[in-house]
Amino acid sequence: MKRTIFPLLALALTGAATGLALVRSAPNPGGFPERNRHAGPDSARVEAFLGGLKAADPMLCEMLADQVGNFWNSFGDLGVGLLSDGSRSWESARDSLYGPPTDPAALRRIARAFDDSNPCVRRAAAKLLGHGHVSEIAAVIREGLKSSSARVREAAALAAGRSDGPELTEDLVRATRDPSVAVVAMATWGLGELERRESVDRLNELARHDDVRVRRAAAHALGQLEDARALPALHPLLKDADEGVGVLAAEALGHIENAASLDPLLGGLGDASARVRAAAAHSLGQLQQPKAAAALGRALGDQDERVRHAAAEALGDLDDLDQAPPELIAALRSADPELRRAAAEAFGNIHDPKAIDGLAGLLGDPEREVRRAALRGLAHIEDERVTPYLLKALKDSDREIRKLAAEALGDRK
């Protein structure tokens, strides 16, 4: 049990050990506070945090590493919603870890963690460093990329990708030629995170790499760039022997949103992997090509529920769809409540009067979210037959549904 709670104790203790007391943040109704509202951690706090992670249960370590830099600010809650005997003495320690590291000693401690035997600690350290200002961390990252240790170079590549620093693009391009495949894969991922289109040619080359980790990273990165020059490299990856590569390639094609990907993604609906089929269906919706409607309609009969749900949602995203495929209307009567909801939401975009009877039948559905989706679908259909159903929805037990019905009726007057 002591191993499990140590990281949380470390956060509390570092606030006292360093003598750094930060004022509780004031409310900020306008949005998230800026990253630099809080001073970054000093070396003692970094030492306690990374030491706590190293001693922690592996699952908790990974969970905390996931959250480095994510919503660790105080938003001025002033104790509302907290248990009465709860202590917030650790709050300033947490907030400092959200701030960008600038203390030279803290930066050196983070850099040393790049060679830690615990991969979770290396990941947390890389994220802490990447959270800093590029002008202050670039030298540390570049030094790490030149290390004789492959795991240090890999962690440095992770930090570079997290940094949002375009000036590190060339450093990562060079790292994609590293003798360690692990470093190549991480540097490839990092290029995607930096979103610099000048790296598209190198990423296209990496999409043909022998190692599956690199191909996965390249597919993801090319999607982040959203550059049509990546299409010739991504289309073959849809048929990759590795399922993960196929999924990431399909997702990337959805991000790029180019009509030239219509046929490859339609082919992806027939892939042996349900995950690839679902990703292809989702991306077809992002392409917004009405020519995909018939194939997506057939995908509503797929044996895998993920594919059926993705196909229903994609049909709702298609532009200028004059008529919904009959399979989508049939999906309103599905035994699967999630498919009924997805189909109903799709009709909120399609506005097809042929769906009125099917949507009206869902106003008595036992699932609240299905009833809400059906009502929204009906509200978007300009047909006088809809009005009685909106009046019926005014008596629903759900307050949100009654509110939606009243708004819809008001819009029709």
Image: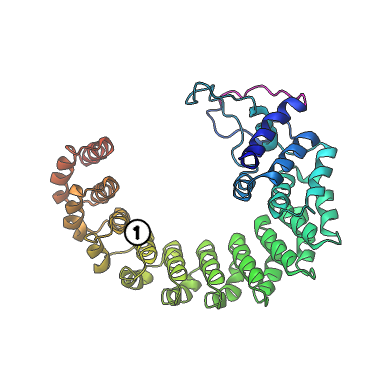
Q: Which residues are magenta?
A: 18-27
The residue under the point 63% across, 72% down is: 212
Q: Quadrant of residue 50?
A: top right
Image mark count: 1
Disc 1 marks a residue whose amino acid type is: Gly
Q: Main secondary structure of the magenta part?
A: loop
Q: Position of residue 5 (x, y in %)?
A: 62, 38
In the image, residue 74 sits, relative to residue 284, either above or below, namely: above
The residue under the point 60% across, 64% down is: 220
Q: Quadrant of residue 282?
A: bottom left
The residue under the point 21% across, 37% down is: 397
Residue placed most toward the observer, 266 or 90:
90
Q: Position of residue 245 (x, y in %)?
A: 57, 70
Residue highlighted by disc 1 = 316
**Per the image, is 19 magenta?**
yes
Q: Position of residue 293 (x, y in %)?
A: 34, 69
Q: Quadrant of the N terminus?
A: top right
In the image, residue 246 sits, relative to residue 358, either above or below, namely: below
Q: Position of residue 281 (x, y in %)?
A: 42, 67
Q: In screen coordinates, is 34 left or right of 172?
A: left
Q: Quadrant of the C terminus?
A: top left
Residue 305 appears in the picture as rendered? yes
In the image, residue 168 sits, relative to residue 324, either above or below, namely: above
Tell me the SS state at disc 1: helix
